[in-house]
């Protein structure tokens, strides 16, 4: 799991064309207090490095940059 797309992140899974795959993904709101801090002023702050969890990436065998994939 990570919070930004980056081409240097290795694929979490590889699938064949036409293969069905299912992931259990975290919701951006389920991290709870891990990303929030209450400042002394009473302002609630949000650590953007800990929010918006992304799942993947998924590699598709034979797919090349510029190919269009149907999801």
Image (cartoon, helix red, strand yellow):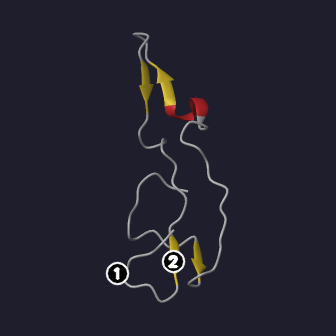
Residue farthest to the top? 41
Q: Around disc 2, counting alpha carbons within 10 Å, would you say few (fewer than 14), some (14 to 19), or many (20 or more)?
A: some
The circle on residue 65 is 1
Spatial separation of the CA atoms under disc 1 and disc 2: 11 Å
**Which residue does the image show at 51% across and 80% down from the upper left?**
60
**Which residue does the image show at 53% across and 41% down from the upper left?**
28
Q: Tag 2, which secondary structure? A: strand
> Residue 33 is drawn in which quadrant?
top right
Label 2, on which residue?
Answer: 59
How many marks are shown on the rendered structure?
2
Decide if residue 65 is on the left or right side of residue 16. left
Decide if residue 9 is on the left or right side of residue 66. right
> Residue 18 is drawn in which quadrant?
bottom right
Q: Give x and y (percent) for residue 71.
A: 51, 68
* Between 68 and 56, the one nearer to me in the picture: 68
* Between 66 and 12, the one nearer to me in the picture: 66
| Mark sitting earlier along the chain (1/2) | 2
Q: Tag 1, which secondary structure? A: loop
**Which residue does the image show at 65% across and 61% down from the upper left?**
23
Is residue 51 placed above or below 17 in the rendered structure?
above
Q: Give x and y (percent) for residue 55.
A: 55, 58
Residue farthest to the left? 66
Q: Give x and y (percent) for residue 45.
A: 42, 25
> Residue 48 is drawn in which quadrant?
top left
The circle on residue 54 is none
Is residue 3 placed above or below 29 in the rendered structure?
below
Q: Around disc 1, counting alpha carbons within 10 Å, would you say few (fewer than 14), some (14 to 19), or many (20 or more)?
A: few
**Which residue does the image show at 50% across and 67% down from the upper left?**
57
Is residue 52 placed above or below 62 in the rendered structure?
above
Discs 1, 2 touching: Cβ within 8 Å: no
């Amino acid at each position: 799991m990570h919070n930004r797309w980056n081409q240097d992140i290795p694929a979490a899974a590889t699938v064949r064309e036409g293969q069905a795959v299912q992931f259990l993904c975290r919701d951006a709101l389920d991290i709870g207090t891990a990303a929030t801090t209450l400042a002394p002023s009473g302002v609630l702050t949000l650590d953007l490095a800990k929010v918006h969890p992304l799942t993947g990436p998924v590699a598709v065998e034979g797919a090349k940059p510029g190919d269009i994939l149907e999801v």
